[in-house]
Amino acid sequence: MVLQASQVPIKPAVAAMLPEPKARWTPATFADLPAWLADDLRDVKIAFAENCKGVRSKPEWTSACARYPFNAPTVEQRAFIEREFVPYQITRADAEDRGLITGYYEPLLHGSRTKTSRFNVPLYARPDDLLVVDLGDLYPELKGKRVRGRIVDSPQPGQVKRVVPYFDRAQIEAEVATLKPLAWVDDVVEAFFLQIQGSGLIELPDGKRMRVGYADQNGHPYRGIGRVLVERGELKLEEASMQGIKGWIARNPDKAQALLNENASYVFFREIDATAAGPLGSLGVPLTAERSMAVDTRFIPPGSMVYLATTYPNALVPLNRLMFAQDIGGAIRGVVRGDFYWGTGLAAGEQAGRMKQNAQMWVLWPKGTAPPM
């Protein structure tokens, strides 16, 4: 579950008045996919196998998952995909075929299960007093809308209890007694970016690792601190990457917490399997480095195979690759919009933090089944 720093939230009242974007699925051929034959597909069988676990309840995938030649050479795997799937180019309703691809990764932090003099920055578990209300249960026209808050006593004796917003980042950082730490790390800035990525690995003092994943969020709107620095004239737009933000914080340590508090949104974590090949995406399966991506599932169904045509970060070198839509993200909103999962650790973070490229996308849909156009 990825949460991007570039997101500019829209107030619910305004969002409700905006027209819902629409997608167009245009039939294509494999010859239309840029450099399709250059993608060696060596690790596709790993992502495909994990994907089949996540789409097992979808009848359109039954045949392909049962017959995929996992142990065959890549040439046979390519032939199977070409035989069993149909490419559809995804564009906006106005036929615009270009969109945005960003990147994310799984951070590796240093921490402990207990608080120490070094490890004193908490990662909190989902709080027991966090209330989630599905407004669609009360008002059908608000289906899919949720609010988060907490229940407090009325200031007037004898009056009913009230639901108020949950604590924001500044309040949580000032310590809320009801919150329970899941683990402790040694860097408040890395903990902040862990929340943006949504999951990560923590190396413990004994050398073992624990993995944490997204459990919930406090309900406050996300505000990208990179945009805050750009609006203040502290950074140029092209400098507002993860690396640029960390550089500014390193130069201004006394202003770090105030900047982080500009983003009132706060993510809570749960412990997940550290032995899995990668963090769990929203499809419920481990992500595969450079084969998994997050999409807007209003336009691309979860578990879809997506052929991505873009370029590497800060370069004009083509990056054309078969991907799997195995995740979602709060900032991944739009028809031609994706988030590329780079993997775990520093090198992956370097790529992810700089990725903001133009892209085209094709969905490879199982042949003989109706695509959700």
Image (cartoon, helix red, strand yellow):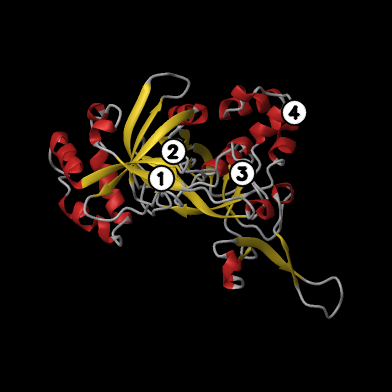
Q: In the displayed image of the protein, which residue is found farthest to the right?
A: 156
Q: Is residue 45 above or below residue 248?
A: below
> Helix or strand or loop: what does disc 3 sit on?
loop
Q: Residue at x 47, y 37 (%)?
A: 104
Q: Nearer the viewer, residue 316 or 247?
A: 316
State the image coordinates of residue 16 (x, y, percent, origin top left): 63, 55
Residue 243 makes an appearance in the image: yes
Q: Is residue 372 above or below residue 336?
A: below
State the image coordinates of residue 26 (x, y, percent, origin top left): 34, 42
Pick whichever of labels 3 and 1 is earlier in the sequence.
1
**Direction from residue 153 to residue 241 in the image, left or right:** left
* Cβ atoms at labels 2 and 4 below 8 Å apart: no
Disc 4 target residue:
232
* Cβ atoms at labels 3 and 4 below 8 Å apart: no
Disc 2 target residue:
95
**Direction from residue 157 to residue 344 in the image, left or right:** left
Distance Cα–Cα, label 3 vs label 1: 54 Å
Q: Nearer the viewer, residue 76 or 243?
A: 76
Disc 3 target residue:
116
Distance Cα–Cα, label 2 vs label 3: 56 Å
* Cβ atoms at labels 2 and 1 below 8 Å apart: yes
Looking at numbered disc 4 in the image, what kind of residue is underneath it? Arg
Label 1 environment density (alpha carbons within 10 Å; few <14, some 14–19, many ≥20): some
